Image (spheres, coloured by chain):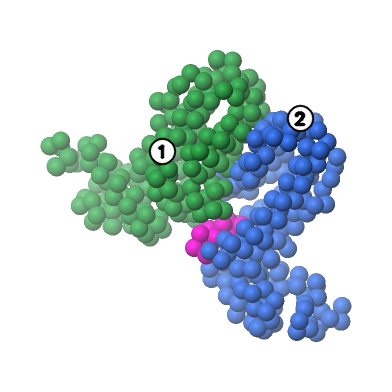
Chain colours: A blue, B green
Amino acid sequence: MAEAATPRRSRLTPEREAELYEAVLDLLREVGYDALTMDAVAARTRSSKATLYRQWGGKAELVVKAIRHGHPTRIEEIDTGTLRGDLHALVTQEDDCTMQRNAALMRGVAMALHHNPDLLQAFREQLVEPELAEFRRMLQRAVDRGEIRADCPALDFLLPMMVGAFVTKTLLDDQPPTRTFLTSYIDAVVLPALGAPPS
Amino acid sequence: MAEAATPRRSRLTPEREAELYEAVLDLLREVGYDALTMDAVAARTRSSKATLYRQWGGKAELVVKAIRHGHPTRIEEIDTGTLRGDLHALVTQEDDCTMQRNAALMRGVAMALHHNPDLLQAFREQLVEPELAEFRRMLQRAVDRGEIRADCPALDFLLPMMVGAFVTKTLLDDQPPTRTFLTSYIDAVVLPALGAPPS
């Protein structure tokens, strides 16, 4: 805890890191990705730009790490014993209020992906791919338990199958999906597509 | 054809209308929705702003009509006799080049939806809902033929199920989906979720 007050040159304490990420998320909500500057992060967090660059390499990496911190989908901690239980746990980790709060932020970042190749790369490598790898492990356990077949073709389409559930309502109703909507989608679409037992 | 050269006050010929829509789509690709003005459309198409407003009511309606014109998913013309045939026909109406050409345009419009409530409303009412209604008729035929059950829960999630296939690759690879990807998704996810015969 003493470290938090006097951050060392080479490493930040988890508390100080969390504080920085919160500040980055606040700034993202306030001004969006394009207008967010490392100067503003440094000023808001009373840190030097040199520290920020040394620790994160650049704005894209810092923003993606902050999102990952603020959006802690801990897929690796989920293991309920059934695929249905795991998938329900996955989509109900965040309550509806948090989902609402993060929706505008994620939409802003999604838009910024397309004119910021470094952000797109960091987003894929540090957010999408690690989560997809954990998601695949969850499904492998279902294969091992005999709930789904190892050669099920839907296993190649996990991402599009899930992304639609998250973005459609956001796009057309300007509302994030509710947990009720997401669990119904799991039961009606994802489990049948995977050929998994409905309950 | 003579009408095309001298458009009447009260109504435009189909040729003149098509010409206007093409000009709107070109402008959308060039400057995006937010920067597109009725003045620019009027100048580009040598028409009066009064005509544009009288004919379309406003920018949002004009843009949505232009998109619908440029993206002629004629769901109502598809009737192959099987659900799989219909869905494959649906996602292969556009060739990969057209899909590529329209992807950036659609992404720009999707972004603009969120700070333009009138655009969101026109997009829903004049584009999404009519196409969804046609899509539902396609599925009703499959129900009538006994290919899918009338109470299949996935029928309530047609839109998110399809949207994921279209946006995920665009979002993460900055590439529109190919027809091969879309037909594979239909076979691996949509038909099994609907409990429809695989072929």
Q: Amino acid at mark 1?
A: Glu
Numbered circles on residues, count: 2
Residue drawn 77% across and 51% down? A75
Query: Which stretch did the figure color magenta?
Result: A105-116
User: Which chain letter matches label 2?
Assistant: A
User: Which chain letter matches label 1?
Assistant: B
Is A36 contained in the magenta span? no
Alpha-carbon neighbours of circle 1 within 10 Å: few (<14), some, or many (≥20)?
some
Against A104, residue A181 (above or below) is above
Q: Of B159 and B103, which appears nearest the observer?
A: B103
Secondary structure mostly seen in magenta is helix
Q: Residue B95, how many percent across, how many down?
A: 41, 40
The residue singled out by tag 2 in the image is A198
Q: Residue B106, how many percent across, how many down?
A: 45, 49
Secondary structure type for disc 1 = loop
Q: Is residue B162 left or right of residue B53?
A: right
Numbered mark located on residue B94 in the image: 1
